[in-house]
Amino acid sequence: MEYNLLCCNVGRRGRLMIDFKQYLTGKGNLIATDNWSVAPALFLADKQYIVPKITSPNYIDLVVDICQKERIKAISTFIDPEIEVLARNRELFFNMGILPLCPSATSAHLCFDKYEMFKYLTTRGIRTVHTYRNLESFYNGFSNGDISFPVFVKPVSGSGSVGAQKVNNKEELEVLFREKKFDYIIQELMTGGDCDADVYVDCISHKPVAAFSKKKIETRIGGASKTISFKDPKLFSFIEEVCDVLELNGPCDMDFFYKDGQYYLSEINPRFGGAYLHAYGAGVNFLKMVIKNIDGKENTSEIGNYEEGILMLMYDDVVIVREKDLLKDYHD
Amino acid sequence: MEYNLLCCNVGRRGRLMIDFKQYLTGKGNLIATDNWSVAPALFLADKQYIVPKITSPNYIDLVVDICQKERIKAISTFIDPEIEVLARNRELFFNMGILPLCPSATSAHLCFDKYEMFKYLTTRGIRTVHTYRNLESFYNGFSNGDISFPVFVKPVSGSGSVGAQKVNNKEELEVLFREKKFDYIIQELMTGGDCDADVYVDCISHKPVAAFSKKKIETRIGGASKTISFKDPKLFSFIEEVCDVLELNGPCDMDFFYKDGQYYLSEINPRFGGAYLHAYGAGVNFLKMVIKNIDGKENTSEIGNYEEGILMLMYDDVVIVREKDLLKDYHD
């Protein structure tokens, strides 16, 4: 059996491609797509396709064509807005014998809409960050003493840290809501204690079977650039609680805060996170688990099976390619 | 002879280390320093040292110790503020049989102080960007019609694009000069047409012997993330003109603007630039020229000896290392 993996919209995730390709050698092919012919990660896969944007009406048909042509056995995306697109087509992929590495449509929507997630987690008793959908409900909470300035404001369905900021007072808050650059939510400001975990959720049992947690040492624009691994059984139990109330499948990047001896869930990006490179470098191999799931077998838990004090230090690498060798971009 | 190269303050320049190490295999050792034990590029050299900050009174003595111990044949720095430190010690290095890859002290100072450089280039008839040192001289120029808004404001001795910005009117300009976050200069705003070149200036003849020019396709915070090579004999002649009025040595990163059929010099960073990776990937090898200079031989010009239409596409890579294997940081 050839374990051919399709990674959609690979963008700048070059090292992830290198790691995947290395592991898949002799096992299957690594196929990558992007909508821009100069996405560096494209050139580090075994084969690459240029696709239209995910909002294009024929997007999913073209992805299906690639899956058939390349005899794909599992599909994954590296960009947040595509997760729901894949999740809505889970049945289609299953019928083609392809394992979709994405949550159920319902859980995918919760991961994408941070306010819906807050409401849902609260009803299910999962600790999360206090969140308001609009100014009115925030002022209600404010006058009840449930929240105070400074607060944290971010887009309800943002990606990365785009548009996310600390807000010190009512005036600043109202300016943001008047400017409406994003559809914002208002959150309690959690200071310090942030950490995150790369979690592999088994696609059959929907239980977490691997979790690699790390703290940030240095952050640059766009994310953590230096991280260090740690282990805490309390965090691992909390991850199991979180997974119990959702239907996740495959790799997830989960963000947490630690406050007064307890972990709080900040958000879940149900895809390979930018810092999964750290987990892989420390010997935590999600692709091994993907392959077991492709074979229809459940993975057993290896949570915490790594060393503490392993550092990931990020730097810039490059792909060199000739313009005349580029694939053609789509023009709708 | 062992062509051992010392690279000071290597920081995040990991791919540069990998390229250097590859080329030096069998020829010499690559030694790296930094003042922070978690600088990723440290781990990609043959041997690494932690040094104090360049402002430390015993900094140069410690560098000299490393040079002796490692039988260094050429020394280079990757950070702008250290260039003058090396330049002031050129004689010291020469006396130890070490080639310092940095300008003369006078030229190093001109490269660091953008206003002094403007004045100097103007007296020598080299086209550059119109620059004012303070508000008073700017308003003089403004009332004479020599300059108009928008203008470009940047620190007189800044690095990268830190503190550099477009300023639209008098009010914005006065706020910046009142806040005094940096010691600013005011420049004519050059729109579009920016490009840059990696130039190797022979350490014996002080003439440019290699030049690789490229344009930006995509810029992210911190610099160009996608570039494409081009060739223009007019730019190459201009680079020769520029080098004629300075005493440069070794690798230089030169920034230009193109306007009305002419190139203008924006600035020179007399060190390996972040995008030298592009030049190397396209076959332009400065280390080969360094080695010839170490041997006391002049390089002959290979300017323009590369292909047009070669792309450099940047992505994040990582170094994985154990905390317990880190070297100790200096504490003054």
Image: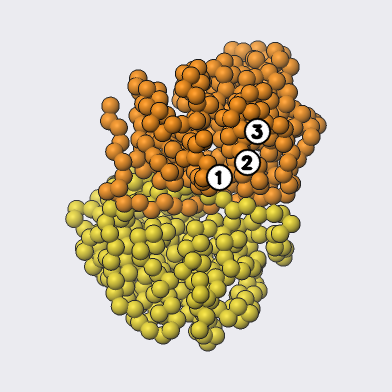
Chain colours: A yellow, B orange
Residue B5 % position (x, y): 49, 35
Question: Is the Cβ of the residue at disc 2 closer than 8 Å to that at disc 1?
Answer: yes
Q: Is residue B124 left or right of residue A286?
A: right
Q: Which residue is mark 1?
A: B23
Q: Is residue A303 left or right of residue B107?
A: left
Q: Which residue is mark 2?
A: B285
- Cα distance between the residues tagged 2 and 1: 9 Å
Q: Residue at x 48, y 19 (%)?
A: B95
Q: Amino acid at mark 2?
A: Asn
Q: Residue at x 57, y 50 (%)?
A: A318
Q: Quadrant of residue A211?
A: bottom left
Nearer the observer, B123 or A265? B123
Q: Amino acid at mark 3?
A: Val
Residue A289 % position (x, y): 39, 75
- Cα distance between the residues tagged 3 and 1: 19 Å
First of labels 2, 3 by sequence position = 3
**Callout 3: SS:** strand
Q: Which residue is mark 3?
A: B199
Q: Quadrant of residue B10?
A: top left
First of labels 3, 1 by sequence position = 1
**Callout 1: SS:** helix
Tell me if mark 3 has few (under 14), some (14-19) or many (20+) residues whose alpha carbon lies within 10 angstroms of its own.
many
Q: Identify the subunit bearing mark 3.
A: B
Q: Identify the subunit bearing mark 2.
A: B
Tell me if mark 1 has few (under 14), some (14-19) or many (20+) residues whose alpha carbon lies within 10 angstroms of its own.
some
In this view, the residue farthest toward the left is A261
Q: Is residue B119 left or right of residue B113?
A: right
Nearer the observer, A142 or A150? A150
Tell me if mark 2 has few (under 14), some (14-19) or many (20+) residues whose alpha carbon lies within 10 angstroms of its own.
some
Question: Is the Cβ of the residue at disc 2 closer than 8 Å to that at disc 3?
Answer: no
